[in-house]
Image (tube, rainbow, N blue to C red):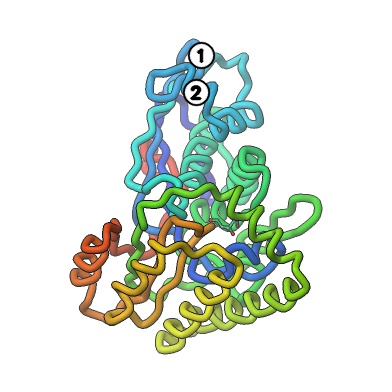
Amino acid sequence: MSDAIPLAPMPLAARAPGKCILFGEHSVVHGGPELLLAIDLYLQVGMSGAPEFQLAGDAAAARAHPYLNEARRMYWDEAYGGVEVEPVSRIPRAAGLGSSAAFCAAVVCGLSAARGGVERSLLAERSFAVERAAQGVGSPGDTSAVVGGGYVAINAGAGAILWELTDGERSWRVRRVVDPGWLWLVAYSGVPRSTAEAVRSVNRRLQAPDGAELLAKFAEVATLGIEAVAAERREQIGPLLDENHRLLREVGVSHPRIETLIDAIRPIAEGAKVTGAGAGGSIVALLRPGHEVDALRRTRAVGGRGYIVRASPNGARLVTSGR
Ligand code: MEV
């Protein structure tokens, strides 16, 4: 397969994009549909052979890092010695923008390349396995977006199937959605959050009597959103983002700082919502065209950090081999 990660001896560098969820976070954990895009903010890791595993030169930091430890345990053989991992990232951490997924994908990409290369679908499977083992909960949405690049739909849509992943209980079919070329505002509230905690609190909320009804509403909005993006019906997106945000508020994953950000952007946005696990983290907004710079100013004025992004055409890849 031409899009495979080739064999590459260390030292090497691998990079992966961040991600942004347009529709369906949280409900995807229960098998619902979701739409994500890989965004053009990147994390890069340099990897070179070393006597032991090190993170930015620090062996204790490597031992304490849950994602690196799972990657090493699952996809490395200590007979090869250790690896010095040097990460550099433009993706804010614990912000809902895929820094953990990008780290998993870039590290697994590098380790797999050094051990002979890997098909992209297997890289997606491995990256999910590492993230899931480290977090204990979650879906393969984030890791699929950062491995696949572009727009991907989970459990919905009509595009080509990229891969199908399972945790033994649920399965997630990942499809390509053609990039409509739109710009997005993503803005970090400055409130870090834990994905695992947010997922567990939503799971508890969904056990209430209206849980099934809420999941059905999430699924309806995400399905309509996927169809609208695939058909480039931009005028439908804003109201669907707003509706998805209302549902996310209902399951308790907004935050006062998120609401402040959305209020600041609302006059110049077609629609906006919390993106990712929430309970802090970031928003995504579709702006009225021409308001990008104003959006960055408005975001900063309320203490947020804004980025204008578009889809990264590439998923995780080696930098040093030009792939
Ligand atoms: C986190 O970015 C997205 C969630 O749906 C969790 C997951 O899918 O693993 C909240």
Number of numbered discs visible in the structure rendering: 2
Give the residue type that dot 1 points to: Glu
Q: Is residue 139 visible?
A: no
Give the residue type that dot 2 points to: Ala
- Asked whether, in this view, residue 44 is left or right of residue 102, the answer is left
> What residue is disc 1 on?
52
- Find residue 233 and report its image quarter: bottom left
Q: Quadrant of ligand 1?
A: bottom right
State whether residue 245 is above or below residue 231: above
Q: Residue at x 36, y 71 (%)?
A: 262
Mark 2, other Cα within 10 Å: few <14 / some 14–19 / many ≥20: many
The residue lying furthest to the front in this view is 256
- Asked whether, in this view, residue 219 is left or right of residue 95, the answer is right
* Front in this rendered view, residue 52 or 7: 52
> What residue is disc 2 on?
62
Residue 214 position in % (x across, y down)? 68, 75
Residue 114 position in % (x across, y down)? 52, 28
Quarter that holds the C terminus: top left
* Front in this rendered view, residue 219 or 16: 219
Residue 122 position in % (x across, y down)? 63, 46
Residue 217 position in % (x across, y down)? 65, 79
